[in-house]
Amino acid sequence: MEEAYLIEEGGWYRLPPQKGRWIYFLLFLLKIFRLSYVLLILFVTFYVTLIVFRKCIKVYDLNNMIALGAVFATFGSAAISIFSLYCNEEITKFQNNITILQGNLINQKFWMRWDFLKRIERKKISLILTQYYIVKNPKITFYISSRQVKVTLPSCMLDFKDILISWNFIKLKYFYSFYYKHIMLNSNEENTNSILVYNCLFNIYKNILCYKFGQLFIWIGSGFIFSSIIFSFWYKEIENIITLISNF
């Protein structure tokens, strides 16, 4: 049987200037998107808090505002506590699966992205010369008859931010049944571990997505805590500002 999968080594590489500028710009847009995502969550929690305060607070009494703000703060703290435990559990599973994949299933030198290396780094050599360097994770290519499915191998939490997690997960999910049939029809005792490699990598990406799901609720909880502090002490001023803006 042909090789069921092939591993492409990772490393730190120098990029051609034009390609480096393009990737650097794309990662900058990704950072802007993540910032917009966080700001959107904060805006939504702020707006929900505003609606509830408008329904419940008829008189601008500090005791009532602090009491209602405490409800939001309690809800936010509970969400952060619960989903922090959930995220920690998913991180533990992720680390265990990485250890199993690299330590037991694939015969390869253990790969770990170094924390001090950015995904892409720009270094100014001179006034007219700029050099770009990029960290490339190992990639696993699964062979399914005439098709190839290439998936990046994450190694640490830094990779959660600059690897296309959802896209890789969708590819692994979609091709699972095809890969399984391909291996079962062409397997022998020496290559049946290919299914285990595929399953392990699939679970690694599932752990990352679950972690990101938990992080979403942690940000929501944080947004409600922040909003509760603001509205508990400055709800009247906020309403005055909103009324002033709406009158324009």
Image (tube, rainbow, N blue to C red):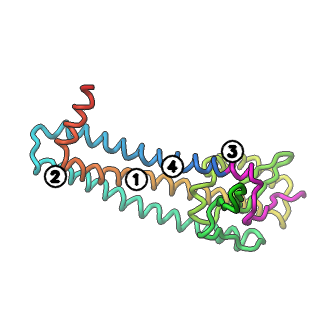
Q: Which residue is at 37% across, 60% downward? A: 82
Q: Hey, what amino acid is under mark 2?
A: Ile
What quarter of the picture does the N terminus occupy? Answer: bottom right
Residue at the front extreme?
A: 127
Q: Viewer-nearest of labels 3 and 4?
A: 4
Q: Amino acid at mark 1?
A: Trp
Tell me the residue that label 4 is attached to.
34
Q: Nearer the viewer, residue 54 or 176?
A: 54
Contact between marks 2 and 1 (CB within 8 A): the answer is no
Near mark 4 (Cα within 10 A), the count class, few <14, some 14-19 or many ≥20, is few
Dot 3 falls on a residue whose secondary structure is helix
As drawn, the residue found furthest toward the top would be: 248
**Residue 78 image position (x, y, % from top left):** 31, 58
What number of labels is visible?
4
For the magenta stretch, what is the residue range? 1-23
- Please tell me whether residue 227 belongs to the stretch shown in magenta: no
Query: Residue at horizontal 31%, vertical 39%?
Result: 47
Q: Is residue 197 left or right of residue 43?
A: right
| Label 2 packing within 10 angstroms: few (<14), some (14-19), many (20+) | some
Q: Say which of 134 and 169 sits in front.
A: 134
